[in-house]
Amino acid sequence: MNFNLEINKEKCIQCGLCIRDCMPKIITFNENKEPVSIKERENSCINCQHCLAVCPTGALSINGKRSENSQNIEKEFNSEMILNLIKSRRSIRHFRKENVSAETLEKLKDMLDYVPTGVNNHGLFFSVIENKEVMDELRKAVNDRIIKIVSNKAIKPIAKTFERYTDAILKGEDIVFRGAPHIIVASTPKNAPCKDYDGTIALSYFELYAKSLGIATCWCGLAYACFKYIPGLKSILNIPRTHDIAYCMLFGYPEINYTRTTQPEKVPVRTIKEIKIKESFWSKLFE
Ligand SMILES: Cc1cc2nc3c(=O)[nH]c(=O)nc-3n(C[C@H](O)[C@H](O)[C@H](O)COP(=O)(O)O)c2cc1C
């Protein structure tokens, strides 16, 4: 990425917000109080585009992104609705045997550009099966192998995982994919600063946005384990060699609907009321 900061002097009101919100401190005022970049720091730009997003008059373009191409931001969100969405999300294991419409698939995929990634790495890669016939082929390929694995107790980590499902698997039940017509597999670059988190964060956003569009999802640790441990399966997903699978999520139109929320136990949330540091221990570290 070539760093490029452009300021429209007629629009700039010299408020300094772009300077204040530049995390790597690349922007400063020049002697005429115009925002300019500090040349030696330009390499530190993580292309977060906060300067573009925060400018109240749309005076700033960064790295080829112009303010007129950004969407305006709603000032208020319905927090009750968002909480209701969170409370009513479910891991759904009964899907209609039909493809999600192309329009909805596009919306879901487009949303993925906006998920947060550590150090704004944005190196995520998603493999999506958009056609249920293709999903059926994957289902067969995986289930054929799992039957062999549970029968022969081969590939230890997988055999152990599937032990408790042996009867169902031998009866031909689709324990892994739950009859879903689609799967999305998130993978992250092996060298991404937050590789262990970016993929699951992305799928969490996917889960909630999908729910808002009437699409059911199910986190799928079993599919993750299959892709990880059964040789030859990962290559089906066309994942770049530079990436590792982060997690998998099934999705499709729900065949069942839930009438009410569940009633989870309270999780411990502890307020820290004072900070106690053992100075003697701490100072010993630096002796
Ligand atoms: C990381 C993770 C992995 C999961 N893996 C599977 C899975 O492989 N198969 C499955 O049917 N459900 C899976 N689930 C769904 C959980 O079993 C589910 O969250 C739990 O039953 C509670 O239901 P709820 O999500 O509707 O609240 C997974 C959930 C998470 C968060």
Image: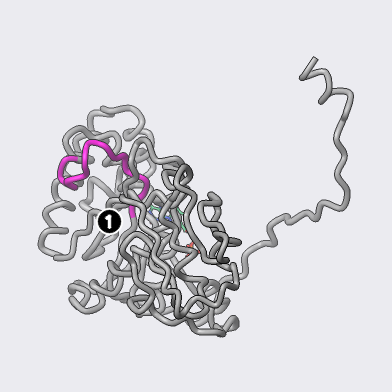
Instruction: Name the quadrant where ligand 1 sits.
Output: bottom left
Q: In the displayed structure, does residue 231 sit left or right of residue 166?
A: left
Identity of the residue drawn at 15% across and 45% down: 236
User: Is 242 in front, or is 35?
Assistant: 35
Q: Position of residue 192 (x, y in %)?
A: 39, 40
Residue 188 drawn above or below residue 7? above
User: Is 213 in front, or is 30?
Assistant: 30
Identity of the residue drawn at 42% across and 69% down: 7
Q: Circle 1 — which element?
A: loop
Residue 42 drawn above or below residue 178? above
Residue 124 drawn above or below residue 104? above
Q: Position of residue 287 (x, y in %)?
A: 80, 14
Which range of residues does the magenta coloring cover?
A: 235-248
Q: In the displayed structure, does residue 90 sit left or right of residue 110?
A: right
| Residue at far top of view | 287
Q: Position of residue 232 (x, y in %)?
A: 16, 35
Crowdedness near tag 1: few (<14), some (14–19) or many (≥20) residues, C-alpha within 10 Å: many
Q: In the displayed structure, does residue 12 sit left or right of residue 182?
A: right
Q: Is residue 236 magenta?
A: yes
Q: Position of residue 113 (x, y in %)?
A: 34, 63
| Residue where numbered disc 1 is placed | 177
| Ligand 1 closer than 8 Å to label 1 CB | no
Q: Is residue 153 magenta?
A: no
Identity of the residue drawn at 49% across and 80% down: 57
User: Is 28 in front, or is 96?
Assistant: 28
Identity of the residue drawn at 23% across and 40% down: 146
User: Is 89 in front, or is 177?
Assistant: 89
Three-letter code, disc 1:
Phe
